[in-house]
Amino acid sequence: MGIDSIPTEVLDLIFDCLEKEKPDKMNRYRHLGAAVRPESLRNARLVCRQWNALATKHLFRTIALMHNGNDKAFDTWKQIVNSPAVQQAAREAEVYSVRPPPCSYYRQLERDYETWCSWDSGDWPEFVTAIQGLGSLPNLRAVNIRFTEGCEGVEKSGYREEIVETFSTRMHTIENVFKAIQQRKSRANQVITPITSLTIENLQNMPFTEFLETGLFRSVIEDITELRLFVAQEDHDDGPDYDLYYDERFTFEPWLQDEFLPCFASRLTSLNITFGECWGVAPGYFDGKGLHFPNLKTLILGEYVIGHHDQFDWVPAQTTLETLCLNRCMIVSYLEYASDDIEKWDDLTTHDWKFVADRGSGWTLHKFDGAWEVIFDTIRTRLPNLIQFRMEHAKLNDVAGRGLRSVDDMDCCLSAKRYVRFSSGTISPWQESDSDGHMDIELGGEDEAECSGVNRAMETQEGDMRAFKELVQAVEERARRLL
């Protein structure tokens, strides 16, 4: 059989495999669409007209718009979205507030500082016009809005301005993307597919209640069935995490639970929530109470920490779940904080924490005796439809493993790093254990400052492993019965 005799359907499947070929795993911007598609797929377009047509469909399935201060980039984007071939091929659009850094993160952001200044006041009509080009893509189903990591809250911390993307620039981008989606929906005499998937990467951890109340927001989210959020917050590498005491650090998570997620709850079939660092316990609290997703099939949680016996109950309450993934999710075993932290954090939730030692000067050490054994058993017994379960713990420096993960990207294993400790007085309040599960903790009081080797993972190993294996086995058996 000659190569020109291969059926079109078979060629299409082959090109689909080429499209899914992944670039370097450490490239955290590996979802840039045609910008980083495999070279083999590009070369396929050069073979013949048939291959060109088929490869183009896969090559431009995902397209990217980058706001990098260069109007020529906007011109290129306009040419792309006005191409009939691209209009038919595009299924997913990426909108970047600035060009993502290829190598040096800080060097690239410094170069884009003027771009941000202009966009901060909403003064960038070329970018707005380019965003409106989404309306030219009738088959679009997913929109991904991607911001940068550097952010600063209402209370300034001295963060270097040239590496900060302000909250206002992020909201300008979100609002204009939503306007483009709304205008696309209202176009007369055009058959379009609804946009059902929304991703926001590096959504800043600041509530925006007023936007939730607009007709624009409600109009767009009424079609969203898949929501993916990666939440960013201020980061201090050179000193204590004083931003722990900023308002947004203890108000955002309750707002996410009580106001934002309920807007999507009735329609979602897939939900992925990941933060840039540990969340759920302190200073913000998220226990999911009151959240009900009647149609939810897939739930992925990243960096979620459990610090109370009932905190995870909201997950097994979603009985329609078929897939559950836990990426770098942990149980906090020891918590050290000052007495005035409770006042600063608006009544820190401390039930289930047992007093261990008085550190002096208002500091105390507490322990939470929760164990993964209980959580695994709960998942197994209360989620009867679960047919996929993933749990892994990527390394701190594994950038590709710490963002928004998909089910296919994750393994399933029981890590010794599944327990963590919290101390509000350290540079990084969340202190992971080592690869064997050991944590150096001063268990004594003010006059007994010796570090003791604590290994919560080892203490719970037998029960955790038993429950983990039974959960995995139960899920696999259910999946086999459906084959």
Image (spheres, rainbow, N blue to C red):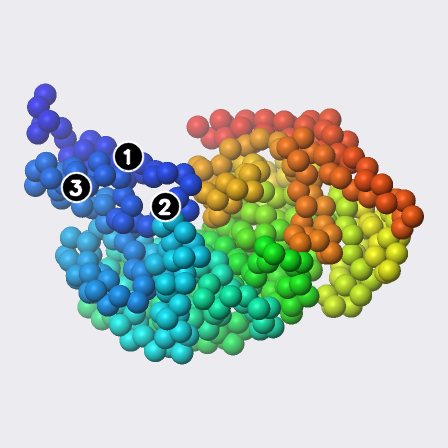
Callout 3, which amino acid? Leu
Q: Residues within 10 Å of mark 2 (few under 14, many from 20)?
A: some
Q: CA distance from mark 3 to mark 2?
A: 22 Å
In screen coordinates, is 469 left or right of 185? right
Q: Residues within 10 Å of mark 1 (few under 14, many from 20)?
A: few
Q: Nearer the viewer, mark 1 or mark 2?
A: 2
In the rendered image, residue 57, in percent from the top left (x then y), is placed at 20, 46
Q: Look at mark 1 in the image and give the residue it sits on.
A: 17
Is residue 384 something one can see in this rendering?
yes
| Label 3 SS | helix
In screen coordinates, is 296 left or right of 94? right
Q: Residues within 10 Å of mark 3 (few under 14, many from 20)?
A: many
Q: Residue at x 76, y 59 (%)?
A: 349
Residue 54 numbered mark, or none: 3
Which residue is situated farthest in the top direction here? 1
Of the image marks 3 and 1, the number of the one nearer the N terminus: 1
Q: Look at mark 2 in the image and give the residue it sits on.
A: 30
Callout 2, which amino acid? Arg
The C terminus is located in which quarter?
A: top left
Q: Residue at x 28, y 34 (%)?
A: 17
